[in-house]
Image: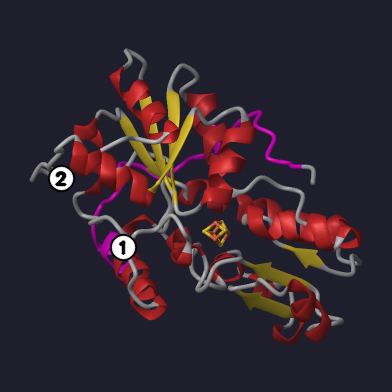
Amino acid sequence: MEYNDDQKNVLKILKSKDKKFLMAAPSFPIDFNYSTFVALMKKLGFDNVSELTFGAKIVNHEYREYINAHKDQEMFITSPCPSIVNLVKNKFPEYVKYLMPFDSPMIAMAKIIKHNYPKYKIVFLSPCFAKKLEAKNSGIIDATVTFKEMKEIIENEKIKAPKKKDYFDKFYNEYTKIYPIDGGLAKTMNAKNIFKKSEMVSCSDCIKLEEIFEKNKGKKFFDLLFCKGGCIGGPGILSKESTNLKKKKILDYKEYSEQEVMGKKRGLNKHLEGIDFSAKF
Ligand code: SF4
């Protein structure tokens, strides 16, 4: 098969002498077997593998601090989804000031990896094309492929998952594994302890933003994802299963990881010293 430029870029990194770090979007269990995923990626040539879960935990922390410090602000719009950020910028420029001024978990995690492993090349495994562009524009992530493109590489290079177990890097967190599901951010940041239920809107498939803002006038916290069901519905995902089945896969993985030791250690604050997670839109 003919690889596209992004796939060629990843293969070039894999063949280089550089150390390589793979960051996987938290929706990876939709297309990959979670129990063999890390071993498979290491067989492919990555030295370290992490999810974005630790980055998501940091973003949650920044959100809580920011909201508590800006209690009088009219509304807050979450910003991990670049398609939502672009929609707001293009169609509702007057709302840009409400976008949470922080990195997405992907950029936060890339900053953490760069800070702790400055010489590593970073590859991102993405559920969508919007995040590919966000990664490219970040200047920190060296290459990105979608789940579908990574599966093509694995098939074409004839990589088989080893039977032995392997573990995620220490940048790890369990409860943020539901981030790619509709409402996952609001739930894991405990937004209900800050806002009343009647002040919050969590929704996915947010193509018609104007209707969402119109219908929810006066509400304060908008947790929005562009794709159906959240990132589990991203266009870079191969699976055509129903949204309910995809959601179940993420919840099953979370349950599995609570029983298994998936990562050696949890991410610690010492890994974050001096990193600025703020963003401008
Ligand atoms: S909701 Fe869709 S477009 Fe937005 S980050 Fe997730 S997969 Fe990408």
Question: Would residue 11 be visible to someone looking at this image?
Answer: yes
Relative depth, front residue between 209 and 221: 209
Task: Residue 45 in the image: state x and y as whole percent.
Answer: 25, 28
Is 58 located above or below residue 42 in the figure?
below
Relative depth, front residue between 16 and 53: 16
Which is more N-terminal, label 2 or label 1? 2
Specify the segment rendered in magenta: 255-279
Q: Is residue 44 left or right of residue 80?
A: left
Task: Residue 162 in the image: state x and y as whole percent.
Answer: 10, 41
Label 1: which secondary element: helix
Residue lying at 30% horizontally and 41% vertically, measured from the top left: 264
Task: Residue 194 in the image: state x and y as whole percent.
Answer: 72, 72
Of the four image quadrants, the one with ligand 1 is bottom right
Residue matched to label 1? 258
Q: Is residue 275 left or right of residue 31?
A: right
SS majority, magenta:
loop
Outermost residue on the top side: it is: 17
Task: Residue 98 in the image: state x and y as whole percent.
Answer: 83, 60
Crowding near pointer 2: few (<14 within 10 Å), some, many (20+)? Answer: few
Question: Looking at the image, is mark 1 or mark 2 nearer the viewer?
Answer: 2
Is 146 located above or below residue 79 in the figure?
above
Q: Amino acid at mark 2?
A: Lys
Residue lying at 52% horizontally and 31% vertically, measured from the top left: 141
Q: Is residue 261 magenta?
A: yes
Residue lying at 46% horizontally and 51% vertically, measured from the top left: 53
Residue matched to label 2? 165
Question: Would residue 107 be visible to someone looking at this image?
Answer: no
Distance Cα–Cα, label 1 vs label 2:
16 Å
Q: Is mark 2 within 8 Å of ligand 1?
A: no
